[in-house]
Structures are given as C-alpha cells and as structure tokens.
Image (cartoon, grey):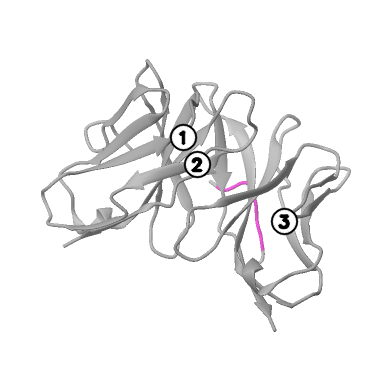
Amino acid sequence: SAVISQKPSRDICQRGTSLTIQCQVDSQVTMMFWYRQQPGQSLTLIATANQGSEATYESGFVIDKFPISRPNLTFSTLTVSNMSPEDSSIYLCSSEGLGYNEQFFGPGTRLTVL
Amino acid sequence: DAKTTQPPSMDCAEGRAANLPCNHSTISGNEYVYWYRQIHSQGPQYIIHGLKNNETNEMASLIITEDRKSSTLILPHATLRDTAVYYCIVRVRNAGNNRKLIWGLGTSLAVNP
C-alpha cells in the first residue's frame, strides 16, 4: 500500500486568494487523483493527474480554477484559485499504482474560505 | 451521477456481524464494485473489491449477487472502531479511458456497545 501525506492539513483563507495543496506519495505511482468533499457530502472527483501529461478534468471543473501539477511519479499539487466561500471543502488526494487495484487516500486538506 | 444506492444509516451491536447492503442495478459487465470506509475527519480507507465472485480478506467479506445488481459487505465481528461511513462504489472508465470511482452517499454505520 502507499502512504500519502498532504500539506497543509487545514487552512483558513480570504476570498479572492489562492491556495496550493501538496500531495506526496511514499512510492512511485502512475495515477494521482484530486477529490473534493463538501461538508456532509460524498466525494466528487475533480481531476486525474498522470505524470508527463495534462490533467483530465471532470465535468464542472476547469483548469483555470483548479490548476494541477504532476512533476514526477510521487508528487502533485492542486491550486484552488480565486477562492470564494463555496470552495470551502475537504480536498483529498489519492493514488493508484501500477498493479494496484485500489486507490489510497491522503488525510485531506480542510479549507475554509471567509 | 452515483451508480449505487445504500441505506443512509445502520446500527450494529459490538461483536455481531454487520451486513451493509448496496444496490447497483445499472452496473456494466466489466465494472467492479468497491467498498471504502471513512472514519470521521480521515481520508477514505480501502476495504475490498470484486467483479463477479465473492471475496474475503482480513477486514471483510463481499457477497455479490449472481446478476451483479446488488452486493453486501459483511464485517464479521464489528467493533466500536468500525463506526464509520461505508461507501459502495462502482469503478468505471472515463472519457480518457482512465479508471474512475463513482461515489454514492454511503451508509453511516454506528457500532454500539
């Protein structure tokens, strides 16, 4: 299994600013994913990030709002841009390695936008 | 849109088996059923997955009906630490042919002493 860490674990931000969330995996993985979990809700996939290619965004999510980087096989970042209170959520990173059938999740980043 | 439906909540006595049902009547032939759980304020934890056959691991058993339209997750001896939201999920392929988990609303399981 992969161990995933995220930074920051939580943050409180002002509207109109941007926050970059980092996701570090302890082993090389092929695919990384970014999810959003709004209060009391289930998980919604934002995008899939493969190393060496542009991220694939799900319907309702755009690169200008949620730019993603994937510079190597163990690291990814998600930026939440021009934040509004509606962006207050838990943001989760997960990974799926070659030969794995399951995704492993980080602990999440709890974002509050005032 | 979620491809699974689950009861919103269930209770179970400590030490007894917890049987969590899930309906996935629109599942396609090559789509897997996954189960994850999420303990409060933590990231989701993988439990088990299957395609057609019943599966068992150290955490749980997964029973899939022959028509694959429903499944049941069984925690054989529930403990207080099993209190969590349990998600039944269908894994599909998205437009980019990447594997994608479709999350439903989950079942909040309360294990009582």
Q: Is residue A59 visible?
A: no
Q: Nearer the viewer, mark 2 or mark 3?
A: 2
Left or right of A91, for residue A104:
right
Magenta part, dominant SS: loop
Which labelled disc corresponds to residue A26? 1
Residue at which label 2 appears: A3
**Residue corresponding to mark 3:** B22
Magenta range is B2-6
Task: Name the residue rendered at 34%, 20% in the picture.
Answer: A54
Q: What is the three-letter code of the residue carrying label 3? A: Cys
Magenta span includes B31: no
**How busy is the neighbourhood of tag 1: few (under 14 within 10 Å), some, or many (20 plus)?**
few
The reply to whether the magenta stretch includes residue B3 is yes
Q: Is residue A64 visible?
A: yes
Give me the C-alpha separation between circle 2 and circle 1. Answer: 6 Å
| Quarter of the image where one finds residue B68 | top right
In this rendering, position of residue A42 left or right of residue B8: left
Regarding mark 3 in the picture, which secondary structure is present there? strand
User: Which residue shows up at 49% across the image and 21% down it?
Assistant: B96
Q: Nearer the viewer, residue B28 or A39?
A: A39
Between the residue at mark 2 and the residue at mark 3, the CA separation in whole angstroms equals 29 Å
What is the quadrant of residue B14 in the picture?
Answer: bottom right
The local crowd at label 2, few if under 14, some if 14 to 19, many if 20 or more residues have their Cα within 10 Å, is some
SS at badge 2: loop
Q: Same chain for the residues at labels 1 and 3, yes or no?
A: no
> Are labels 2 and 1 assigned to the same chain?
yes
Instruction: List x then y, in percent, for residue A63.
Output: 27, 31
